[in-house]
Image (cartoon, rainbow, N blue to C red):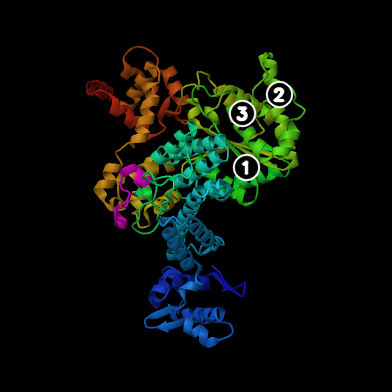
């Protein structure tokens, strides 16, 4: 928050002085009682004489607002019982001007005056010079206003993209939305516009890659698939049926009609994208705040909480690599623990620093070619560093399709594959020597064998380079079915166990971070016992926490003891489906041993399991398999004792047991004592 005078920025004083101005500014023209200002400024711990301190702050702000005229300062910021009022013309406040320009742009767009709408949206977005109330979001009213304005800005960015697409300016859309997509990887309306613009520029592969990254992020962080509109854009790109001007915000529109969206993130409104396609509520009147679904606020992406230390460590390691200490970094953790969210934040921070980051996503589907991860990387580099890429690959005459990683026909497979992989390694290190490069390979556990072989070859050449390679791996790699029939666990273990690989293991959020995430989703004031119970139930896993919160339906349910108690006995539907699929794929013996363990309780020992099975066979091999698959955990201090990695695994097993079978196992377990 700054004041500009004659083109120059005028200092407004220390943070608390600026906070006072901000608290008055968000109630422009309204009297704010001194008691309320004291409470908001000092959070219940005011100085000995808060009224006198407030008067001092006000005097300072008056001089800052009108340094050449004390009377003018007193007029702008005056005492009016029982508090103070800021009597500033709204036209001098960028936020008010921004909202006015956006409203007028909507009217112009509705009248099909697209160029006029474009000019107003450009002017509105040009008023932004950073985050609102930067450095002051520890004051709750300012944090709420900052969030509201940011949501309006994002809606304006999306509206700008709609108009640009209608005017035939996809290059402007890519320039504006590229950085925004890195910051907001789950804002589907924005992603849809960017995919459309990329397609129009002939960059279909990048548009499809963007869709896959978005879909994977939604699945990991929120447990949902892409909404119907984004899926429709994806399908039309695949079929080459996408036409522009296009409309991406709800009902189909004619080719010459552009409908600008409405502000999101304001009190009582819907989120402008997901809600309209999920529950058919588009066009409804805004709901009361306590009736808004918890998963729909405050925005598309879960708040970044509890991972600041990990982010700082990744930034330091990346900086080391870009200074010539190249290395491979692996972020490992359970599904939903926040790997994608952490990487998205890292990519956004690096982008703000001007660092080039190339991202690729593994695809376990049938028909995906070998080296798919690296094909994505090379294709993007061939576009972003066109001349340098051409020079770096000029000497590989035998690999004319290097960017596609396609060997020449008729070549000896093993030798050609090695030479092709060697060429990729040389190309990447050469480009990094020219300008530092960061590569992000997501979901490496879903990759193909040749891609892993290439990574192992590149890993040995990273030392001394300015190339940083960051991969994400789910602990699921040791427990899922082999990808495309190929067991890659050995290759993954080799990569992780190499001394040159820096490994960061993400665990669940702390109880405090869990409380912060709940507050970011549903607001403050949730009972500590409820927070503690949710943390214990989810083990701090953000995905599981958000799944449970979404099941509550409304924020007020978190204050309903019966609703919370019922919630703590449920398995989220999406997680239940995933676990059921995994359990169904297990060998019959392993599944049966797990069912017996579930009946015996949260933990069991081998002797008890063997006795309960009553078939004379040793269950040790099945238990070991379940431990390797991360379904059971061995007790390090008590040999032969193990427990379920998650309460949800046990509850899913119990829920799927036939009643008669469950009764028989319970009776047998009871006889064992």
In this rendering, the answer to whether 539 lies above or below 588 is below
Instruction: Evaluate whether residue 601 shows in this view.
Output: no
Instruction: State if disc 3 and disc 2 touch (CB < 8 Å).
Output: no
Q: Which of marks 2 and 3 is in front?
A: 2
Total numbered labels placed on residues in the image? 3
* Residue farthest along the bottom direction in this orientation: 71
Tell me the residue that label 3 is attached to. 495
Please identify the quarter of the rendering in which residue 597 is found. top left
Q: How far apart are marks 1 and 2 (CA)?
A: 25 Å
Tell me the residue that label 1 is attached to. 357
- Residue at left offset 75%, top offset 41%: 434
- Image quarter (top left, top right, bottom left or bottom right) of the C terminus: top left
Mark 2 or mark 3, earlier in chain: 2
* 287 within the magenta span: yes
Magenta region, residue range: 274-293
Label 2: which secondary element: loop
Instruction: State if disc 2 and disc 1 touch (CB < 8 Å).
Output: no
């Amino acid at each position: 928050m700054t004041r500009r005078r004659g083109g120059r920025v005028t200092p407004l004083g220390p943070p608390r002085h600026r906070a006072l101005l901000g608290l008055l500014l968000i109630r422009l023209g309204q009297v704010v009682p001194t008691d309320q200002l004291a409470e908001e400024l000092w959070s219940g711990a005011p100085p000995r004489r808060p009224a006198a301190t407030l008067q001092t702050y006000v005097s300072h702000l008056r001089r800052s607002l009108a340094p050449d005229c004390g009377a003018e300062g007193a007029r702008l910021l005056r005492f009016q019982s029982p508090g103070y009022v800021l009597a500033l013309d709204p036209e001098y406040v960028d936020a008010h001007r921004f909202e006015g320009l956006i409203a007028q742009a909507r009217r112009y767009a509705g009248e099909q005056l697209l160029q006029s709408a474009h000019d107003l949206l450009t002017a509105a977005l040009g008023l932004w010079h950073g985050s609102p109330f930067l450095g002051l979001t520890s004051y709750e009213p300012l944090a709420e206003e900052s969030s509201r304005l940011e949501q309006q800005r994002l809606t304006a960015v999306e509206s700008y993209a709609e108009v640009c697409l209608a005017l035939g300016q996809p290059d402007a859309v890519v320039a504006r939305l590229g950085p925004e997509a890195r910051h907001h990887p789950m804002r589907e309306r924005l992603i849809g516009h960017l995919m459309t613009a990329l397609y129009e520029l002939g960059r279909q592969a990048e548009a499809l890659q963007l869709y896959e990254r978005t879909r994977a992020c939604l699945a990991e962080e929120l447990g949902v698939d892409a909404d119907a509109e984004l899926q429709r854009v994806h399908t039309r790109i695949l079929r080459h049926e996408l036409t522009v001007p296009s409309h991406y915000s709800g009902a189909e529109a004619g080719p010459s009609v552009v409908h600008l969206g409405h502000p999101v993130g304001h009190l009582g409104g819907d989120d402008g994208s997901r809600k309209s396609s999920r529950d058919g509520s588009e066009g409804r009147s805004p709901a009361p705040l306590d009736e808004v679904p918890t998963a729909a606020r405050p925005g598309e992406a879960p708040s970044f909480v509890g991972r600041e230390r990990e982010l700082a460590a990744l930034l330091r390691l990346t900086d080391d690599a870009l200074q010539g200490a190249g290395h491979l970094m692996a972020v490992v953790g359970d599904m939903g623990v926040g790997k994608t969210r952490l990487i998205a934040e890292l990519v956004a921070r690096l982008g703000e620093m001007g660092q080039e980051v190339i991202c690729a996503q593994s695809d376990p589907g049938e028909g995906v070619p070998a080296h798919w991860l690296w094909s994505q990387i090379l294709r993007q580099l061939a576009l972003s560093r066109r001349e340098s890429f051409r020079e770096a690959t000029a000497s590989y005459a035998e690999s004319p399709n290097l960017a596609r990683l396609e060997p020449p026909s008729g070549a000896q497979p093993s030798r050609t594959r090695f030479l092709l992989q060697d060429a990729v390694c040389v190309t990447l290190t050469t480009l990094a020597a020219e300008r530092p490069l960061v590569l992000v390979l997501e979901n490496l556990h879903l990759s193909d064998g040749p891609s892993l072989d290439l990574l192992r070859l590149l890993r040995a050449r990273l030392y001394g380079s300015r190339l940083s390679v960051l991969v994400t791996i789910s602990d699921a790699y040791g427990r899922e079915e082999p990808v495309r029939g190929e067991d890659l666990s050995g290759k993954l273990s080799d990569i992780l166990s190499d001394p040159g690989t820096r490994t960061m293991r993400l665990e669940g959020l702390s109880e405090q971070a869990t409380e912060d995430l709940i507050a970011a989703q549903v607001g403050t004031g949730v009972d500590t016992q409820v927070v503690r119970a949710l943390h214990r139930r989810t083990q701090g896993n953000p995905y599981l926490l958000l799944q449970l919160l979404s099941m509550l339906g409304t924020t007020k349910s978190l204050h309903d003891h019966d609703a919370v108690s019922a919630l703590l006995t449920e398995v989220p539907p999406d997680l239940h489906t995933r676990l059921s699929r995994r359990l169904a794929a297990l060998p019959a013996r392993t599944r049966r041993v797990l069912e017996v363990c579930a009946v015996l309780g949260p933990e069991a020992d081998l002797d008890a399991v063997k006795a309960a099975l009553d078939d004379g066979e040793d269950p040790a091999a099945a238990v070991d398999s379940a431990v390797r698959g991360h379904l059971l955990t061995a007790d390090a201090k008590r040999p032969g004792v193990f427990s379920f990695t998650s309460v949800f695994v046990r509850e899913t097993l119990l829920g799927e047991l036939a009643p008669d079978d469950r009764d028989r196992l319970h009776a047998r377990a009871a006889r064992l004592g």
